Amino acid sequence: MTTVLVVNSGSSSLKYQLLDVEAGEALATGLVERIGQPEGRATHTDGSGAEVRDELAIPDHDAAFAWMLRAFADHGPSLEAHPPVAVGHRVVQGGARFFEPTVITELVKINIDELSVLAPLHNPANLAGIVSAERAFPDVPHVAVFDTAFHQTMPPAAYTYAIDREVAERHRVRRYGFHGTSHRYVSRAAAAYLERPIEELKLVVLHLGNGASACAVDGGRSVETSMGMTPLEGLVMGTRSGDLDPAVLLHLQRRARLDTDDVDDLLNKRSGILGLGGHHDMRDLVAAAESGDARAELALEVYCHRIRSYVGAYAAQLGRVDAIVFTAGVGENAAEVRRRSIAGLEGFGVELDATRNAERSGKARRISTEASRTQVLVVPTNEELEIARQTLEVVAG
């Protein structure tokens, strides 16, 4: 049996997929939203695409799992016919403690809770989902797959910030990186597409969605990534600023009288392409730029300029780049973003094929020319399948 249930629990949501890992297929997917609010929403879709929707009060994560179990029983596929051998949980922050997927024990839960200080918006919600899932599925192992784990191979020079060492150690201030399951999945999928051993490849993977990060992958190992202690650092994102002079925060606190919560809200929710161009959805931003909106045009240029800067920096760290790989919602679908991000890199042996770049496909594909020394690929990510694979590897162990 290779069926795994993958759970991604948020503070007010529960996403799940039942996957046949050997086939690489989702047997069912679901989303429960507005947990704890008066009117919740839930959707369950089976492998054939048949969908059922429901609106009801969902007071907590226990109720969300109860709805999920009813959806499987009433609409399929049957969990008796497809019993999960394990439940895999996405956990955002594993700190410097978790380097690999880990079977969840009471001690592991204590550690996830203790690490909430580094991810206060995510780890508590992840833990709530774990506790409820254990009640719903008490007879199978549960495995935590950490967003940060893939980046634990970074060398000290890459993850160390140049601040007072004792202060940094006391408060665990260092680069952790995120989107690890996506970067791991995509780098291996890119190697498979290129029909080359991942051990010999040097890749720059660009996970571009509402959240965005770059990763330098050397022989299948993360050696550098753009997100830092939190997911705020690095590339420009939908509503997050990415890299910023730290003194800007001091200036805003002193001159604009912004307190800590104001700054947090500004940088995480009112910045990025939303703050610059008035749109947090890349499709809307590109359309506005093409219609002559100067603010949108500048936002798009800033977004792609930052990507290009990271590609160049990571090329220097890697020594060479065999392939630049675009993934996630923006990376897989926004041809204009890919074009602008690659423009100017011709001197590094990167040549984009305009026709290939404009084509849309749900499969891995090359968008560079045949003559390009550095390949440019688009590889769809599948974080749920990656979590399921890692979960199965642990329990099969």
Image (cartoon, rainbow, N blue to C red):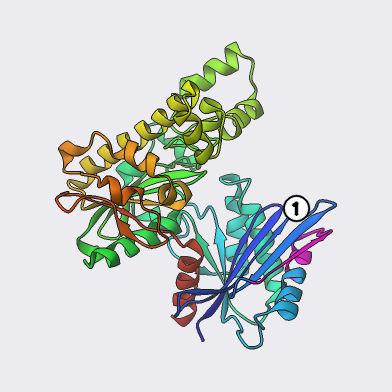
Q: Magenta segment, which residues?
A: 50-65
Q: Residue at x 45, y 59 (%)?
A: 181
**Residue 58 lies in magenta, yes or no?**
yes
- Residue 204 shows in this picture: no
Q: Give whichever of 238, 7 is nearer the camera.
A: 238
Quarter of the image that includes the C terminus:
bottom left
Question: On the rendered structure, is 374 left or right of 129?
Answer: left
**Residue drawn at 34 percent across, 64 percent down:** 189
Q: Which of 121 and 98 is in front in this view?
A: 121
Query: Residue 103 in the image: x percent, y percent?
Result: 53, 71
Location of mark 1 (residue): 34
Q: Position of residue 77 (x, y in %)?
A: 65, 80
Q: From this view, report whether residue 286 is shown above or below residue 65.
A: above
Instruction: Give me the residue at 17% from left, 40% from top.
Output: 348
For residue 62, above or below residue 160: below
Question: Would residue 334 be found to the left or right of residue 55 on screen?
Answer: left
The amino acid on which the numbered mark 1 sits, given as a three-letter code, is: Arg
Q: Could you tell me residue 175's position as x and y percent?
A: 42, 43
Q: Which of 222 and 55 is in front in this view?
A: 55
| Residue at the limit of the structure toward the top, as seen here | 255
Q: Is residue 321 visible?
A: yes
Give yes or no for residue 74 being in the magenta stretch. no
Left or right of residue 171: residue 138: right
In which quarter of the view is residue 218 placed? bottom left
